[in-house]
Image (cartoon, coloured by chain):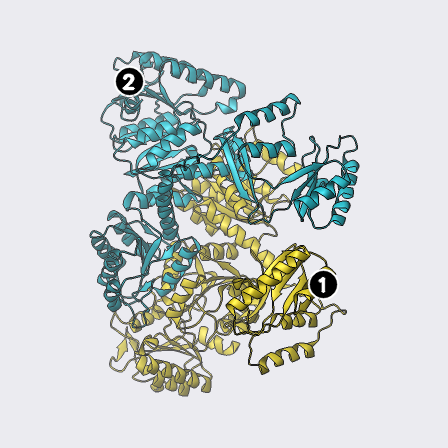
Chain colours: A yellow, B cyan
Amino acid sequence: MKRQLDRVFQPNAIAVIGASNKEEKVGFRVFQNLLQYGFKGSLFPVNLKDADIQGVTAYKRLRLINDSIDLAIIATPAYTVLRLIKECGEKGVAGVVILSAGFKEAGKIGETTLEAVALLAEMYQMQILGPNSLGFIHTQARVNACFAKTPINTGKIALIAQSGALATSILDWAASENVGFSFFISTGNMLNLGFHDLIDYLMTDPQTACILIYMEHLSEARRFMSAARAFARSKPIIVLKAGESLEGEAAAVLHTGKVTGSDAVYSAAFQRAGIIRVHRIAQLFHCAQAFSMQPRPKGNRLAIVTNTGAAGILATDYLIRNGGQLATFSEHTIVQLKPLTTPLWTNHNPIDITGGATAEDFAQALIACGKEVNVDGVMIIFSPQYNIDATEVAHAVVQAAKQLHKTILAVWMGGDSVEEGRRCLEQGNIPAYHYPESAIDVFVQLFTYSKNLELLYETPPDIPETFSRDYEGVKNLIDHALEENRNQLNEIEGRKVLACYDIPIAPYFVVHHLEQATKVATQLGFPVAMKIIATSVYHKSDFGGVILSIYTEEEVVEAYETLTKNFMQHFPNVAFEGILVEKMSKKRYELFIGGKKDPTFGPAIILGKVE
Amino acid sequence: MKRQLDRVFQPNAIAVIGASNKEEKVGFRVFQNLLQYGFKGSLFPVNLKDADIQGVTAYKRLRLINDSIDLAIIATPAYTVLRLIKECGEKGVAGVVILSAGFKEAGKIGETTLEAVALLAEMYQMQILGPNSLGFIHTQARVNACFAKTPINTGKIALIAQSGALATSILDWAASENVGFSFFISTGNMLNLGFHDLIDYLMTDPQTACILIYMEHLSEARRFMSAARAFARSKPIIVLKAGESLEGEAAAVLHTGKVTGSDAVYSAAFQRAGIIRVHRIAQLFHCAQAFSMQPRPKGNRLAIVTNTGAAGILATDYLIRNGGQLATFSEHTIVQLKPLTTPLWTNHNPIDITGGATAEDFAQALIACGKEVNVDGVMIIFSPQYNIDATEVAHAVVQAAKQLHKTILAVWMGGDSVEEGRRCLEQGNIPAYHYPESAIDVFVQLFTYSKNLELLYETPPDIPETFSRDYEGVKNLIDHALEENRNQLNEIEGRKVLACYDIPIAPYFVVHHLEQATKVATQLGFPVAMKIIATSVYHKSDFGGVILSIYTEEEVVEAYETLTKNFMQHFPNVAFEGILVEKMSKKRYELFIGGKKDPTFGPAIILGKVE
């Protein structure tokens, strides 16, 4: 697989089927991108009519090319794709990028075509990206097999996007913010190359420091989890998952035609796999930038250095609200910081080095905080002042940061006047933000990743030896219910299942007449609870079939009458099977536990507090 | 006041004391700003040494100017200010902007100087902005009495900032984002011009559509609330308040030297005054822009039109998470939208008009949604596609919006390639954001303001006639406690106070020996609670002085013994005053109610749920 994907992503020869001389065509842009991006291997345009494409000799058919082809890109209409895939297979192509769209819109015919394409791909062992893909870019190998217009900078971030349109915007933002990429991969409909294949492949890429994923749905959850866990141990994966709300999920189903499964299960799975989940598009870059530039913090203790008291306060508020904490300083650090701040300084974070601070003051404060053992990260907030140059401060911070091994984040507050400063910081590998809040969001994500990583190495404790499970007993109870054509257990059966797993329950009796009830209640000890038992009746509280907190014999009599009356009134034709009397237990927590089969992740356990 | 502030903010003649020819001086910048901004009145530089300042004839002393002066700006060191204020007073100046800083740093001397300045200002009835102010800008009157370097655009937003340094950054951001202002006022230390004075004044300014405030502390809460309530009825006030967390509050105290008071009380007060509180700096502009450009929505039902399914899903997720809802469409609207979207469309929001959408498609979808009665606002999300021009779509949207009266927000996703489109939208009065999340944040703030406005007109219901208050009884109870030098009531007294206000409490007795306890418990009916009574002992639960849920006579005996044992063990020298036996009440909610005197807002009532 690795070797084959190498042929796809670092090809020696690429054929572009549908390469064009007409500017408005996708086949024009992708061929131009390939040409202009400086690809070192061979490029073969395939076009039925034109003899050359953008100055390169064209072939009428793929099979007419004599050389071996590693990667084929298809930019022709949907109806041509099936035949072309066969041709690619016969030619021994390693992978195909299908830029063509319009399969889903073609209804049943489109679906059948895709099925056939998938079968052919399997037969010929070809990797398929798409259809409906924007293509991919591998910056190091100088392969721009993508029809987006936006230029892309080289960097350490790999971006995998399940929406081409969103990816275009992401690349556009990234270009404006000087964010660079190792890979950009637009998956399109994910016919056979899955997230797990891409993650596994990127794990071996030394250029990639972290992976960003825009995800709408996941097909092979188990393989994804295993790939992600392996990758996340060394490098972070940041996911923006759409369809979090029920309304959003409905829209996602419409968009992709797939059921996404419960969002809560996604969140839990991501956390267990060490994946960072973000909820705003902007956080995707902000986090990625920080991860690709900075070491991650060991904890959540931040030192804040600023020349504007106000920004320090706002940053503090936002840090605390989002689960971080202010670092405290040891005596040695305080001595070093003292001369940099005001006489009124109380030795606490944030450190206001005041409006008069020089570039050197910023550098010294950064070094003092960065060397403090109680500090996990340092945030430098610069605000333009009358007699200080934003870029000069940036240079000083970059220099000072070289001797430190802590997470450093910069906030250069303002617009165009501090833009050069921000650029200078990022060239020096210090991520620089416009607002303190954005930097704090990132710091929180960084230490959350650290925390999640610890979880990755956690294994559940062994089952205690004294624990006994009566599988046979459970099986009999369920078989019995199934024989009676029931898909739910009744109250008593439920209790028996719990008993089979050694889960303690409050003592109880089932009674069939009043005298028995009062006798049993006294025997159990007050207070007790009483419930109607009837196998086919489940939501007992709804019709007054449950009475709690019964303290006296008189109340038992009353409860017995009320329960039977309510039951007969609502279920005149259902057999009465008795009344359950149980001891009330004093509750510390009221929890519910459930199991469900998630369409994406399979069996899931739900545990929660009853509100 | 209004007339006097008119003289300050729309002066005919301005004197700049400390105007300078030296570029590094504050007095240089402020004078240059005044000159270059196109002020139409007379400008008088005052400088002891130079004969002219930046080409304008200078005066050695303020008193040597023959003309009447409306506004004086002081840009000289702190120690000169007191004398200069006196001179200003004698000259009949209406207002003074003190740019000078360094009072707080001067300790006791600084404080005394400020006190004297305040006294003189009162004597001469002068309005003072500062000290430690950055100055102010009134764009319409072409007065730039401020020493910030950033250019400022004319617009409808008034910005009041309690931190000069932060304000510099805010102006800088605003310039980069094409946000314009009617007023910018840096309050500095707020010696005598308070927020309420400024709000009252801005209420009469037709150029101002909304007020932004960066606030660290409030001195005259009552006057602020009354000014804000009056203003907020017609135009919004948006506040970014620092010191929300305890840590942030501590930093704010250090920064301003003032106690800020409880943040929860600020929030409650803001809400009652119809003020919008934001928590991120970026939201300040984003909201202000929307308020100054768009009508506010009547409800929270948003229609989302997009050419990228993915963005629609992400926007939906974020909308739902933040309390908004997706609008539903009536038959007529669905008929109009149908041809614009895919054959798979299910008539629901968000509306994916697909990657092939033209500018005209965007316009039509906007009009259809904007005319739908079930829609309170429309969000248009544009994502760059292969064959569509971002600016052309922006123009079409601006044209279409002209026939609508709903809130319209635009998101042009991407970087530089869509920048012109964003500018074009904002010129057409449609706020345009980079990310869907930012636009949703704004939409949520807009409808929250609408909701808060309704609160403004709410008055508490009349006190029912049957309600009786026994003031005399309460007074006696409190007097009695005070006579005994206590500042807390004991359990029994507390119950009596509640009774004086007709607040029902569970029936109880105080007993002094065991037999009495069992008798009383039976009489009240089980279950009961038992508590130690001792006037000087308040936190009874802490030492086991409270036992709840006692169901039987045996348990009463046990409880009595435990309580007396615990009490004697912990308070061997405190007099035993008996044991309270009361009927347990079944709880629906467990609430606490309290009163406190907030240092800023005065009497406050706290009501909450016990967790």
- Between the C-alphas of marks 1 and 2, the distance is 98 Å
Residue A362 vertical placement versus A275 (above, below): above
Residue B540 pos. (x, y %): 69, 38
Instruction: Kindly indicate the quadrant of the structure image that contains residue B1.
Output: top left
Label 1 residue SS? helix
Label 2 neighbour load within 10 Å: few <14, some 14-19, many 20+: many
Residue A251 pos. (x, y %): 38, 66
Q: Is residue B423 left or right of residue A15?
A: left
Residue B162 pos. (x, y %): 42, 32
Q: Are marks 1 and 2 in contact (CB under 8 Å)?
A: no
B337 or B65: nearer the viewer: B337
Instruction: Kindly indicate the quadrant of the structure image that contains residue B158.
Output: top left
B423 or B280: nearer the viewer: B280
Q: Residue at x 63, y 23 (%)?
A: B480
Q: Residue at x 50, y 20 (%)?
A: B111
Q: Chain of mark 2?
A: B
**Could you tell me if residue A57 is visible in this image?**
yes
Residue B210 vertical placement versus A87 (above, below): above
Q: Chain of mark 1?
A: A
Q: Is residue A416 left or right of residue A238?
A: left
Residue A134 pos. (x, y %): 37, 70
Q: Residue at x 25, y 62 (%)?
A: B333
What amino acid type is highlighted by mark number 2?
Answer: Ile
What amino acid type is highlighted by mark number 1?
Answer: Lys
Residue B330 vertical placement versus B202 (above, below): below
Label 1 neighbour load within 10 Å: few <14, some 14-19, many 20+: few
> In the rendering, which numbered label is found on residue B69?
2
Q: Which residue is mark 1?
A: A519
Label 2 residue SS? loop
Foreground mark, 1 or 2, reads 1
B520 or B216: nearer the viewer: B520
